Image (cartoon, rainbow, N blue to C red):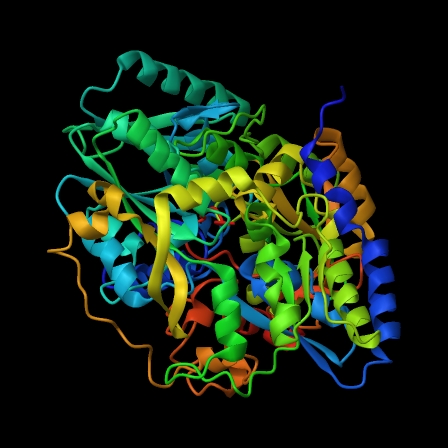
Amino acid sequence: MKELELKNLYDDFRDGETIKAYAEIISEDAKKLKKPINIMEVCGGHTHTIMKFGLPQLLPKNVNFIHGPGCPVCIMPKERIDHAYVLSMQPNVILVTLGDMIKVPGSNGSLQDARAKGADVRFVYSPMECIKIAAENTDKKVIFFAIGFETTTPMTAVLIEQVIKQKIPNIVFHINHVTVPEVMVELIDSRDVHVDSYNNEIDAFLGPSHVSVISGSKIYDKFPKDYGRPVVVTGFEPVDAMQGISMIVKQFVEDRCELEIQYKRVVNHEGNLKAQGLINQYFEKMSLFRWRGLGNVPDSGLKLRDKYAAYDAEILYKDVLPIAEIEDHKLCICGDILRGMAKPQECTIFGTACKPTTPIGSCMVSSEGACAAYYKYGNLL
Amino acid sequence: MTKTVTLAHGNGGEENNELIKKIFYKHFENDILAKSEDAAVIEDGKLAFTTDSFTVSPLFFPGGDIGKLSVCGTCNDLAMMGAKPKYMTCSVIIEEGFSTRDLEKIVKSMKTELEINGAIVVSGDTKVVPKGAVDKIFINTTGIGTIEYPGITASGLKEGMSVLVSRDVGAHGATIFAAREGIELESTLQTDCVSLYPQVKALIDADIAIIALRDATRGGVSAVLNEWAKSSDVCIEVNEESIPVQEEVRGICEMLGFEAVDLANEGTYVLCVRKVDEVKALEILQKTNKTSALIATVSEQYKGKVVLNSTWGTKRFLDLPTGELLPRIC
């Protein structure tokens, strides 16, 4: 069998001619739109693709993007970042997390700052690395600060499974996993003091595809059915994104409202049942998880089930962890930006007090946020 | 400026510049330093003078080691000013418990590299510090070279000029990342670490009029292009597809969410020449590296900025890399 090369996985999906062809199809179809449409790409990965490949420059004026809240580090409220910071500063602790997380500032600074002050903070590409770190540092406690959507949750679950199976005594968990559908509902259908989505401008969703590799497309069934919003589960390469956008535009032109899968090469309706089983075994829903920029979102966070409390750093270290919630900056309008009700430039602190090097709101925190993208690409958008 | 120094301040990008400007330049201010070239030009343009410190983990990596790196780095900075490396100092800080065998291995590879450059070490210093005070070994080298081709400057770019890279980009950064703890990637990648003086000499001997020349170390090709765009107050328009990147480097970038142009190199340089010299310059570069390429032209579209043009007609700014390079999460 011929070996599959990595480039085969992306080369054709970045083909300039194909991208241009889709741009033409979209432009033609968009002429038939009755009103402009706003498509929310929920996932930060999509935002990254859209910005990196300059896709808005190829789209007609009546097809717009709203950049969603799907970047796991951006949505982390300050008090939870403070948890990470405090944990890393405990004696004999190695705090392990995934890449980007170490850059995000909490109220005392970021994990990078903690590391500069002597904390042992490490980032890993795969959570399973924790096992090696724990074996090399038996006199220390390894705390895995778990973040991410459905995509990364199974990796944490597998690590927990192995920690229990191998009876590893020095790995515990601080869980910050969140789920996508609940926050999508919040963006279009919330009526509470924190988030009033009554005037949201979201017409359709580009569904995060790697989330659906795990959870299947079934998690989006209710959006066309109950909320009148089409969803197209779409891959991350530019050709994928353009095809996904084209499928959404066609639905509007043909007056359909459906759940479709563009990313058929890996996504089906049911998803990875084994991974779902693992998640279910170790995690349960938290009644509320506070999102930076959006406030409390019901049922959107996961926590360890009670029977695994012995592995839960939030319980084990509860005496040192700050509990007070830290409100978002008064002038920050990330919540409105995330619902398409405002653009970054309309924020009074955008580009002045709030910059990528000193982010105040969630949308400026990572390069995948809307404000960061506008700041960086500004006059080219 | 933050209260404490973080690793992001050593990335060769924005934070690094801030640290240098706000603390070092502020107090050391003088005309020579202010030019912020790869090496200082002193003694009425006769000599180039530079220094560099080296710390790398792991110490030995595919295609090189910290010794080779410490000679290449300093000699390359001299070569980038059109100078022939002549004399060097070598100063090492060693952690207690370090293997003398490894030390000798490092010094031997320094010697090999010195010979390639035709330079000699004429002074040195050793310090041994308690365990934990440094990570195994840090090396500082300082070099002096005689300038053979004067006038190379980051502020000499003008509209219509051409920009080339001497080989495919990002190999060193990708190699080090793959070899790093916590990533666990297997690859056959090798660092590009090499002494560049022979390549610069070939350009000079062929009568290429060199406008600007810089090795794309920390911060990668992005950092060089951004510095040039700012120093010369021009726009550098890069044809994205023409940037040469090895398949394996691209693969690692895809997996970890990096851009090859942001990754460090240790033997790759960027060259700016007049349009008329473009073909001849590429010919010379190709003699050493088949992957060398013409990647950009200088314009006035967005002054002080680097623009990447895609094959499907979109454009975006190529910024200085910011922060520590960290893998993307999903």
Q: Is residue B228 in sight in this rendering?
A: no
A274 displayed left or right of A134: right
- Which quadrant of the figure has residue A234? bottom right
* Residue A231 place in picture, x, y as percent: 67, 65
For this rendering, which residue is in front, B39 or B170? B170
Q: Residue at x 74, y 65 (%)?
A: A245
Q: Residue at x 32, y 53 (%)?
A: A303
Q: Residue at x 31, y 11 (%)?
A: B101
Q: Quadrant of the N terminus of chain A?
A: top right
* Residue B230 place in picture, x, y as percent: 56, 66
* Residue B33 place in picture, x, y as percent: 40, 58
Q: Is residue A262 in sight in this rendering?
A: yes
For this rendering, which residue is in front, B185 or A158? A158
For this rendering, which residue is in front, A149 or B11? A149
Q: Residue at x 55, y 85 (%)?
A: A341
A8 displayed left or right of A222: right
* Residue A263 place in picture, x, y as percent: 70, 51
